[in-house]
Image (cartoon, coloured by chain):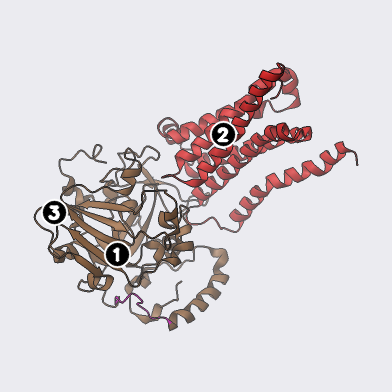
Chain colours: A red, B brown
Amino acid sequence: MTPENRIRWLAKPVVWLVCLAPLAQFVWLIATNDLGANPQEFMNRFLGDWAIRLLLVALAVTPLRMLTDWNVVLRFRRLLGLFAFFYIYLHLASYVALDQVFNWGEIWKDIVKRWYITVGVAGVLCLLPLAVTSTKGWIKRLGGRNWNRLHKLVYPAGALACLHFYMMRKGVQLEPIVYAVICSSLLAFRAAYWLRRRTTARTSSAP
Amino acid sequence: MLIKLRNHFDLKAFEITPKTVFHQRRTFLKAAAVAGGALIGAMAPVHARGINFAGVAKSKWSEAALSEHDQISTYDIATEYNNFYEFGTDKGDPARYAGRLKTKPWTVNIDGLVENPGTYSFQDLVRPHQLEERVYRFRCVEGWSMVIPWVGIPLTDVIKRLGPTGSAKYVAFETLLDPKQMPGQRRRVLDWPYREGLRLDEAMHPLTLLAVGLYGEELPNQNGAPIRLVVPWKYGFKSIKSVVRITFTDTQPPTSWNMSAPNEYGFYSNVNPLVDHPRWSQAWERRLGGETNIFGFVPKRPTLFLNGYEEDVAALYAGMNLAKNY
């Protein structure tokens, strides 16, 4: 097998399966009616948990390449980002359809009055253009440089997602803090890397 | 859980426990588990904590007093979906970990501005009083609700026996502090021990209950065993669990959630659809296990002022600005 074929026929299907596993579990829990006493809350949180996890995994790709020089990991970045968006979309859809049952008036009130929802929606708005421009056609249309620039919106999206999670929980809880620490480490790593490159060589093209 | 202990005492509460099994797919497994549990139950003392549930009196607040929109929640929902951060922040954590809590022996410290202070055993505190069944709506600040058949004693009866002095204006309560039994206390989610408080007249309102049981059984640990407060017109977090201390004071006592986020949780925390929590609309609630819509989900329903107990308790707040005193 050529390296190219290994990526295409082995590694990518594995990534697909791993990313779809939470969805499979989700469908299984629905099918077996095992959603607990508050199904809407359970479904929304389940999807939100996986959305933020995958977003952080996607954000970890570039630092991983910086550390290891494995250029091959970049081949999975877009796929992971799109899966993160997929779970974010389901998370949002479960709020709109199951929690609020398309009560747009209440949804609007939530967006303008509840800060953690405002923050969450802002994060989705950051990611929406990235999902739209994820195709090869759009990369060509925008040009690699502009495309890269646009896709830096994933950084505020990651930060907003963590903030959204932290604000949603009551009291001082460990889990959202862990996510926030991971996210800020990933962002700080990039910042440190760029600063160093700017001072040593002056030609930086790291995304 | 439906067969367990059933024939040991005659209790109407069992008749009102819905017979539907919440997780239908587990019906078979559950039947097996219940059969096993019944054997163990038959060997164990019925009232392990020494309170006889046989003479529970009916009260004005019975199942019959519920509106047609209210139905008693299933035992499973009431005992498997709990906020009791002393055992973890997940709703399932209390049911998972509360087994570590030792409720026997249990003592409650009574102190402050009171004529009969001291350390009372759980039995000494409860036995002199008539147990009553109270079927109350229970509204969590997070926007979900249940209907629970509590068994308990009116707090006012206990307060009268303890005899607060003339200068007592408030009653403060504390939950047990013991990270060995309550693993959630190893993390500073809140400033432990959990603290709550009421104005003396709120505490002495006939609706206010010191609960020792639910569904005709002793309180399961995850529901605040062996003794907890139930204040049905306030958000659930006011109904402090596993109480070890009751203090009579002349100043408004600090309360845990108010200390944690004063802009979100006030001292009063009365259920009020007109006063939103910064993070949740309080105009609506989801009755867990309630009627489902065509998608198979329980839609939200309007929240009632003072959780539907306006007639009983509105006089306590006459002339008060409840938006300010949230």
| Inter-mark Cα distance, 2 to 1 | 46 Å
Q: Chain of mark 3?
A: B
Which residue position holds label 2? A184
- At x 79%, y 42%, the residue is A11
- How many neighbours does mark 3 have within 10 angstroms: few (below 14), some (14-19), or many (20 or more)? some
| Inter-mark Cα distance, 1 to 3 | 23 Å
Q: Position of residue B88 (x, y in %)?
A: 46, 55
Q: Position of residue B317 (x, y in %)?
A: 18, 45
Residue interval drawn in magenta: B44-52
Which residue position holds label 3? B168
Dots 2 and 1 on the same chain: no
Looking at the image, the residue that sits furthest to the top is A202
Q: Is residue A175 above or below residue A112?
A: below
Q: Which-is-in-front pick, marks 2 and 3?
A: 2
Which dot marks residue B211? 1
Which dot marks residue A192? none
Q: Confirm whether the magenta stretch covers residue B48.
A: yes
| Inter-mark Cα distance, 2 to 3 | 50 Å
Q: Secondary structure at mark 3?
A: loop
Q: Is residue B192 left or right of residue A116?
A: left
